[in-house]
């Protein structure tokens, strides 16, 4: 069973951590020498972004709009 989360902490949320790791995967994929090296990194990036969206959902936050979306981004206080 999932435990209740405490209100904002000084450390980054799980979702933020997953997004940071996804950015790292994206940067590594951009530097990959071949498609065989790039594909696993892109799959890992997509999985991490999916986990971040799930953490946001679990935290009660609305999901971020997809990249290159014309939707307005909600800013949280």
Image (tube, grey):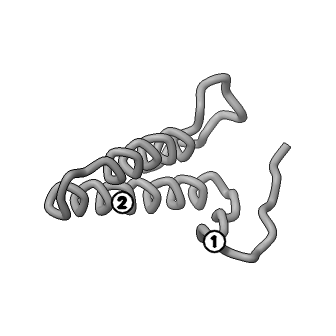
Identify the residue at image location x=18%, y=58%. Answer: 34
Q: Which mark is residue 68?
A: 1
Q: Which mark is residue 7?
A: none
Instruction: Judge whether 73 appears above or below 24 on screen.
Output: below
Residue farthest to the top, as pictured: 10
Residue farthest to the left, as pictured: 36
- 3 sits left or right of 27 in the view: right
Q: Position of residue 18 (x, y in %)?
A: 46, 45
Q: Residues within 10 Å of mark 2 (few under 14, many from 20)?
A: some
Identify the residue at image location x=71%, y=33%. Answer: 8
- 13 sits left or right of 69 in the view: left
Q: Count the labels in the image.
A: 2
Front one among 74 and 60: 74
Q: The C terminus lies in which quarter of the figure?
A: top right
Residue 46: quadrant of the picture: bottom left
Question: Mark 2 falls on what kind of element?
Answer: helix
- 8 sits left or right of 31 in the view: right
- Of badges 1 and 2, nearer the viewer stands 1
Q: Which mark is residue 47?
A: 2
Q: Position of residue 16 (x, y in %)?
A: 56, 42
């Amino acid at each position: 069973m999932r435990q209740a989360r405490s209100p904002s902490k000084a450390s980054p949320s799980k979702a933020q951590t997953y997004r940071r790791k996804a950015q790292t995967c994206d940067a590594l994929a951009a530097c990959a020498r071949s498609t065989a090296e790039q594909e696993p990194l892109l799959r890992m990036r997509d999985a991490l972004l999916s986990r971040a969206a799930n953490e946001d959902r679990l935290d009660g936050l609305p999901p971020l709009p997809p990249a290159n979306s014309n939707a307005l981004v909600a800013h949280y206080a």
